[in-house]
Amino acid sequence: MKGFTGILQVDAYSGYNRLTKDTRADGALTLAFCWAHARRKLKEVHDSDASPIAAEGLRRIAEFYKIEAEIRGTSPGQRHSARQARTKPLMDDFGFWLKAQLARVSGKSRLGGKLRYINSHWDGLQTFSDGRVEIDSNAVERTIRPIALNRKNALFAGHDEGGKNWGRIASLIETCKLNGVEPFAYLKATLEAIAADHPASKIDDLMPWAFTPTSS
């Protein structure tokens, strides 16, 4: 994260909190939390005991997502305007509703714990009013899921250096996918270039985003 400033979209892992400190070398970051995680907390309670309070929370969050579905693909400026005009009033109402429920639901109950989770992340959940930020981190989670599922296979890398090499190759393959590059074609061409003494000073030319496939 060195050199980065601005907004970082994350889940609720507490390790990110230190990035919001003014003591950070590049300045404090603003965290944008994930509404899908907040929704999941209420969904868990609703599925287990059909809580009407959880159901109401889910209905309110669904209104946010309905607006997002309508403005998806528009520019950051258009999304910001739509969120300020349409979503912000709904989110303000959600905040008042949340405070009211916290006052009446026991903090020791399962529902109370889920409501406290949302309340403790409230500032970061509101950050998505910025048009550059997504309402949730689902797109990122879908992208990294194959890597997470591969962890069991990675246990059989053989030794530490094998694990590091595995990680390097996996990173290159996933970067290829993100850039619409066919991984095998990229790896074949890159290894051939290295074998042909491609200069180390021009390593950037071998990155997946710089790859141009040759016609056969």
Image: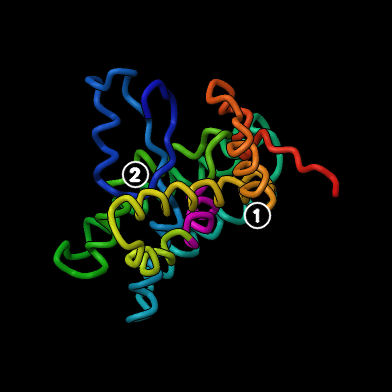
Give the x, y percent position of residue 58: 46, 64
Circle 1 SS class:
helix
Compare residues 47 and 134 and report the one nearer the observer.
Answer: 134
* Three-letter code, disc 2: Trp
Question: Which residue in the structure is indicated by mark 1?
Answer: 184
From the top left corner, tell me how far across and down residue 207 is, in percent: 59, 35
Range of the magenta residues?
135-146
**Vertical arrangement, residue 112 with respect to residue 10, above or below:** below
Q: Position of residue 200 (x, y in %)?
A: 53, 25
Question: Is 113 positioned to the left or the right of 182 in the image?
Answer: left
Indicate yes or no whether the magenta region holds residue 143. Answer: yes
Quarter of the figure with residue 193: top right
Residue 47 point in image, percent of width and height? 39, 79
Which kind of residue does numbered mark 1 sit on?
Phe
Q: Residue 180 vs residue 160: left or right?
A: right
- Tag on residue 122? 2
